[in-house]
Image (cartoon, rainbow, N blue to C red):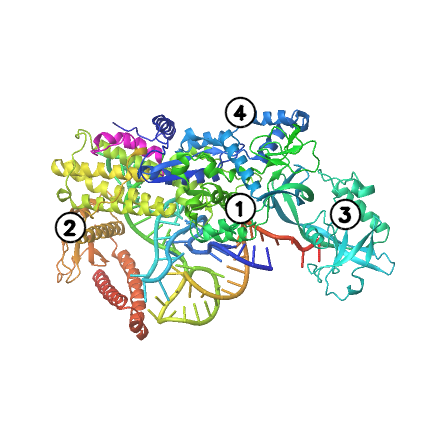
Amino acid sequence: MELSKTFDPKSAEDHWFQLWIDRGYFKADAARPGPVFSIVIPPPNVTGALHLGHALNSTIHDVIVRMRRMQGYNTLWLPGTDHAGIATQNVVEREIAKDGKTRHDLGREKFVDRVWQWRETYGGKILHQLRRLGASCDWSRERFTLDEGLSRAVTRVFVMLYREGLIERDYRLINWCPRCETALSDLEVDHKDAPGNLWYIRYPLSDGSGAIVVATTRPETLLGDTAVAVHPEDDRFRAIVGKTVRLPLMDRDIPIVADAAVDKEFGTGAVKITPGHDFNDFDLGRRHNLAQISVMDTRGRMSAEAGTYAGLTREDCRRRVVDDLKSQGLLEKIEPHQHAVGACSRCDTTVEPMLSYQWFMRVNKPGPDGKSLAGEAIAAVEQGATTFHPKFWENTYFSWMRNLQDWCISRQLWWGHRIPAYWCERCEDSPPIVAEERPHSCPKCGGGDLRQDEDVLDTWFSSGLWPFSTLGWPDETVDLKTYYPTSLLITGFDIIFFWVARMMMFGIKFARGESGDLKDRVPFRDVFITPLVRDQYGKKMTKSRGNVVDPLDIMDRFGTDAVRFTLAQLTVQGRDLVLSEERLTASRAFANKIWNAARFVLMNLEGAPQPIPPVEIPKLSLADRWILSRLDHAVRDVTAAIDGYEFNTAALTVYQFIWHEFCDWYIELCKEPLKAGGAGQAAARYVLVHCFDRMLRILHPFMPFISEEIWQALRPYLSEPDLSDHLAVAKFPTPADRDPLTQSEAAAMNRCIEATQAVNSLRSLVGYHPGQRATATLRFAAGDGDRGFETWKGYAMALGKVTAFAPLGIGQERPARVVFAPLGWGEVGVEAPEGFDFEKARTVLTRKLEEVRGHLARNIGRYENPGFRAKADAETVAEIAEKIEDLKAQQKLLEGQIEQLG
RNA sequence: GGGCGGUUAGCUCAGCGGUAGAGCAUCGGCCUUACAAGCCGGGGGUCGCAGGUUCGAAAACUGCACCGCCCACCA
């Protein structure tokens, strides 16, 4: 089989991916024996389109999944999407807005139908894009957080938590988005510093004996004030604590209370208290039994409680309140003041703390065993049942977990899992019935008029169950037994709180029942936190910056393999990733290099037997055994690097081996034996094919398409006892038990490489063109012997374009017209052509001499330091002594070489 | 206000206690029949600053500066 002149990524990608799927290579079967490697995809939003973050995340997934599959693991990579409650609802709302409609025009049922319709048509596009990347998911297991099975898991978990008292409904102050008209969790609020003012407002004492001035950033909330608070040890106010003030504009008397939470230094030391619209005030209000007044409605307009201000927006109300205070002479002064304003993370509208009934998950509430959801999730990481990579992310996880508040899980949306709580329309004030199935009648009054709670759950509630709900929970399925806990979670740091932390809590609690070791209950053993992808200027990619790189676009331009390789190569633990076209170009060049190497090999296999008969190690040449040895090193290093999530190291190792060892040296060295025919040719053919095969196997996780394409061409020549049909399921190599190269042979090859490079360097210095032949000589340092010179002489001659390579005896004079260069173990010389200016050589050698002298001086200085010899270990001291000898020898050689030139 | 990460060649980054590395870019020479998306060779860094620890620090410690990020209810 012959390969075309250039590699065509597009056709290879389509062809092989389809074939892998058709063959069912990515399907996982729990009944299969062997060690298990399982991983669930972080489900992208159904609304999503593939961006570079996904491309990176999926590349990393696929690299490790493909390696594990090839290593013989029972491998599962489970794909799916998230219904993404608020995000998806917003998308569809925007769509119907084009027809001038709101969701309220459609009504709940029709609107939800519409969202499902949208999802059928446009949703999940992202999963198709993932296929283009080569993602080797088990596509037959695709799940959706709102599908039937997962919804059942959601309901079950909710009911179980409710019955344990870990979910409760309560009237509290929560974050409210007046535009989305829903509650938000603390995490869904972005705090941004914004310029504002501090308004100083005078509150007259009710008894007319004066006034107290408070400072506030939100004057409009004055309408809901139910107290003024001061610090209990503030002498300025001691006398008036317990009195009441007349609340301006509202003409209500409210008390002055003392509370240690008040900062004496801030503002006037007195603060107005609005429990209905401020979290601090809410807490303080509870301590002092203050009334809670909500002066706004769900859309952020002033409510009837705001009296004459009812109906105004928050903003208009503020202006009116300030004006009115001013006209009544109650506004002392206005100071500019920076303060944090909370914004809805979805729509950027300023959130409003609102009093309302919501459902909360009591993450810190201890159970009968004294353990809380958060506590267990913390313990699991502390005990190493789950480990983060890089490790420092554990600090982030801990610091959040340890300060975790109750999680507000209800949303006033329509798209999501409806809360399984039912209200009897007849029994007023009776608690809801929480059950998996809709009850037929009210257990209290027997009436059948039951209404399900209108709220849906936070979208992260169902995502939190993902690692086990997708495996069949609550049923005790074989999948669940086999694949849970999953081996690894790969995700971005931005959802450690939203998702990772919640999966930990849910997984530990439910996936495996309540007993057992934490390490069997956690949702994943390892967490790999991916870097953030930045543009070539190191900026975060955002739509507003317009610097978003579309992965599909660069896949079209550079080939999917090149994109994958680039991303893997840039994935350094604990650091952001900067993508540039130069990198992509380099990776494409790498693919091209591999392609051409394959063409060379196949060209030289013409007429060779299929399969190629193996040749025993002892019958191989030094170069043959050297490349086999290097291959083993590469295999070992790549495996270790991927095992340790060092994807950059892994990619670099493959790159180095293929390009700079296999192509630069081995291919060049085997050209002669290939041409010569006979046993040498047979051996070279065998080693070429064998190395290429192994090389493609370690390349495959990074560049699945080109590797499969080449491997298919090579396959007829392979003589494996259990040869797979395709590389995607071929065995990942393991290094040979014994190094095919002895230590002295390895040393000989290193000398060969050094000598060849020195010859080439000299050739360049004296001005030979690559085509021109030269004669060379070399001399080994005294007492060093020639150490197998004859075994590698031919290689150096071939790659150094040398016609005669004669050794020089220890005592022999250097021949005239030959320019020498020192090596660590001797010197190499190349004869200069006619008319060469030896002055040039002297300049180069002199510079080198200075360098050597510098090193020498430093080392001697170190060696003569009495402290060094006294305190450093003997081995190091001996090493330095040796180094000094080497450097001295080099210095002597250089001096001789320079002197001879003069 | 707390915390985390970063600062090494023009760029992007490895190295993390014993002579400063890679890729790309750059310069010189080559179309040497696998590959010009290539080959051979060269230049380029007082490893952010300061201090201490050590025989020895780019690396470990302390402080500082700058960049980036996360968390936080001072009204």
Left or right of residue A249, residue A768 in this image:
left
Quarter of image, res A666:
top left
To which chain does the residue with label 3 belong? A
Left or right of residue A139, residue A313 in this image:
right
Q: Looking at the picture, tell me which residue is in the foreground, A548 or B38.
A: A548
* Quadrant for the C terminus of chain A in the image: bottom left
Q: How crowded is mark 2: few (under 14 residues within 10 Å), some or many (20 or more)?
A: some
To which chain does the residue with label 1 belong? A
Q: What amino acid does circle 1 point to?
A: Phe
Give the mark nearer the N terminus: 2 vs 4. 4
Q: What amino acid does circle 2 point to?
A: Phe
- For mark 3, give the secondary structure: helix
Give the mark nearer the N terminus: 1 vs 3. 3
* Foreground: disc 2 or disc 4: 4
In the picture, the disc for residue A497 is 1
Pinpoint residue A535: horizontal percent, then vertical percent: 49, 43
What count of labels does the image hold?
Answer: 4
Q: What amino acid does circle 4 point to?
A: Thr
